[in-house]
Image (cartoon, grey):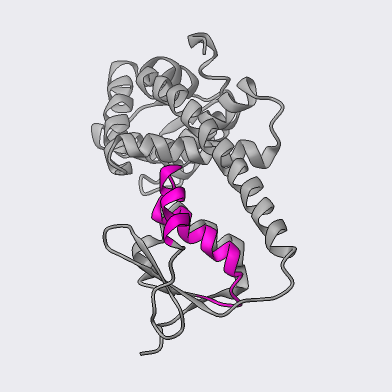
Amino acid sequence: MEKNRVYAGPSELARLFKIEVDQYNRGKWGKARCYVSLGGACYMGGSLEQKEEFAGRVAAMLVDRGLFAISEELIRKEMPYLKKEETAYLSQVVKNYLLEFSQGDPQQYQEELQARILECLEMGEVLNIDGFVRFRMQDYLENISQCLGDAVDHMVRQYESEIYIGNLKELLGEKRELGFPVFLQFQADGGVLMLDGEGRKIVMEEGEEQKARSYGLSDEDIALCCLMALNPREVHLLNYPNAISSGFYSTICALFEERIKECAPKS
């Protein structure tokens, strides 16, 4: 991406900035200390304490809503063909990736931005939010550009997953009879055991499993193949909290929906 296209404009950010200024002016100081234009430029007089409070408010706004707005503007410019909800989804993914750079700690971002804003106010008592983002947040903008590529990959994977689940559901729909209940036991090492209602292990025939392994199929892939073949009327999950973040867990929940149960096998 071209650097001069990283940030698309101040409109939404200027609106958020003006809201923050208006709220500040209604605060504990008793009268307006900050004057802002519709374009997002403000003059901030007062003491160091007042400037610190104002800088903190603006920094919190940038982390909470501003990063999302900046990402959204960039996405609209780079990918104008996206639907509104797709743009919003990508913007949130980009923001999440950015926070991962700071080990998921928004406070770290907020403190860094507060210091930069305060430096601007001490130098000239003027803060232009568009100029601040463009020139004082260059490192953030570069990260946003990098994160956008990752976010697009994430969205593509989501779409591919939806298509994949849809195809599996179509195959299941062709099976008229439902099989016996199956219990899935998620293990601490990431493996998956399949059990029947009596607690007996369900496995592929030895030759079939060896063939599947030769194609690089994992325990989860094999379990999914078995579930598709068995078409159980109920799928009971054991130790499922250990696997909630896994792709396999998401797949079986999306595939079997109301058939998913949470209980233990019979002894």
Residue 49 position, x and y percent, is 25, 37
Q: Nearer the viewer, residue 199 or 25?
A: 199
Figure quadrant of the C terminus: bottom left
Residue 9 in view in this figure: yes
Q: Please say if 266 is above or below 166.
A: below
The magenta segment is 206-235
Residue at 33% from the left image edge and 42% from the top image edge: 106
Q: Nearer the viewer, residue 164 or 128?
A: 164
* Corner quadrant of residue 54: top left
Residue 202 position, x and y percent, is 44, 71
* Corner quadrant of residue 242: bottom left
Residue 266 position, x and y percent, is 40, 89
Q: Is residue 26 magenta?
A: no
Q: Please say if 176 is above or below 228.
A: below
Residue at 40% from the left image edge and 50% from the top image edge: 218
Q: Please say if 62 is above or below 177.
A: above
Callout count: 0
Residue at 57% from the left image edge and 34% from the top image edge: 15
Q: Nearer the viewer, residue 86 or 20?
A: 86
Q: Nearer the viewer, residue 53 or 165?
A: 165
Q: Is residue 229 magenta?
A: yes
